[in-house]
Image: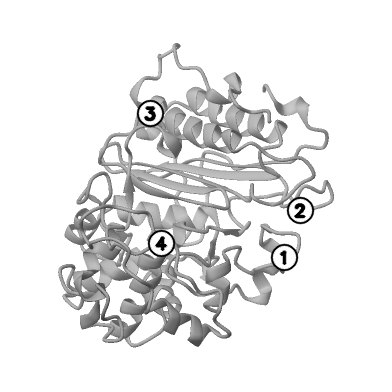
Amino acid sequence: MRGAGKIAGIVAVTVALTPPVEQPRDALPLVVPESVGMSTARLRDIDRALLEGLAAGGYPGIVTVVGRREGVVWRRGFGRMTWSMLSAPVTPMETMYDVASLTKVVSTTMAAMLLWDEGRLRLDAPVSRYLPEFRGEGRDRVTVEHLLTHRSGLPAAPALGGASSPEGARRAMLTTPVTREPGARGTYSDAGPAILALVVEAIAREPIDRFVERRVYRPLGMRHTSFRPSASHLEHIAPTSRTLGAGVVHDGNARRLGGVAGHAGLFSTADDLARLALALLNGGAAGHVRIASDSAVDRFTRRSAGWRALGWDTCAGGASCGQRMGERAFGHTGFTGTSMWIDPVRELFVIVLTNHVLPRESPVPNAILADVRADVADVATIAMDAVGDSSFVLRSERKIGWRE
């Protein structure tokens, strides 16, 4: 395997493609690629891409899970939790990552979708209907849908630096100024999902972390997904900083909000995210568990404002979704080095998690992770769409922009 010999002491964690004879009743389903129309030989190119990025120093470790609606077809972990050769190897099953902006969709958007599904949240309602404090200076014109599609007119991030407590940060967030006419133009914003989380809490009458744990994570068996991870999880968390403690969110505003926020703060494993992806591919259901209706999943994952769906991004061709997923594919990325894409037409999902923001002595070009994530998405689609295509060349072999 090319790339494997480039790193001394490389750690690779792989999982057999065939499921064990006996699995726990709630085990993540594993299927042989060929049984769901995919090529094992082609999927091996995923390993090549991951190892090329690891050898180039793009991340200390990386995990990926690829699957179709029937279950997982490819599950890999290469490298370690930190840059130290003494740190533990990463695994898709146990290594928890700070998923950064994946929080927006895995927590906040999911919560909003469930409340909309129950008729408790209206997309066209002004935010002030649920948060009376969110008024004045144009805020009255901001709707729930504006928050979900990043068309609220709110700035890229709320100014919470002066807050001395999580409660003070929440109050400050509700006075965030509207800098553009709501609905007129899209600007990617952490402020929108952060405020939407407060809407969820006002309707559900409980903190958003408890709501999603009770309604989404626990029913799906996502046992390694949480805000403010417990002490039992700390040894499995891949750090994002040399100074922040294990399990402390990388995003500063999420820390000011107490570690639970609508835009960042969630920690998860690739296997847990795969459970959610499978539920979404199956119309909101996983086995005998249903967390949402198929119509709700369809409504929230279809484009509704430019190339954005409700909360989710859609694949515009390129970036972390690669060049081959269609416009119905939806997903998101996270600043710490995470991504999740789901293609309902191909019934395919691709998850890649790293902690590439962990500092090291020499700078790490962003192009490494960008190319590897796109390669994984493209290889996954080629493995079912164009198995005999010999024209495709991995970006991670070209290495354009991989050196500072």
Q: CA distance from mark 1 to mark 2?
A: 9 Å
Q: CA distance from mark 1 to mark 3?
A: 37 Å
User: In the image, is residue 176 above or below residue 330?
Assistant: below
Q: CA distance from mark 3 to mark 2?
A: 34 Å
Quadrant in the picture for the C terminus: top right
Q: CA distance from mark 3 to mark 4?
A: 24 Å
Residue shown at the point (58%, 50%) measured from the top left: 92
Residue for badge 2: 88
| N-term-proximal mark, 2 vs 4 | 2
Percent x, y of residue 220: 41, 65
- Asked whether residue 227 is in view, the answer is no
Residue for badge 3: 323
Disc 1 + disc 2, Cβ < 8 Å: yes
Q: Nearer the viewer, mark 3 or mark 2?
A: 3
| N-term-proximal mark, 3 vs 2 | 2
User: In the image, is residue 13 above or below residue 5?
Assistant: below
> What mark, if any, has residue 235 been given in the picture?
1
Disc 3 + disc 2, Cβ < 8 Å: no
Percent x, y of residue 360: 76, 46
Type of amino acid at the residue the image marks with label 2: Ala
* Badge 4 element: helix
| N-term-proximal mark, 1 vs 2 | 2
- Neighbours of disc 1 within 10 Å: few (<14), some (14-19), many (20+): some
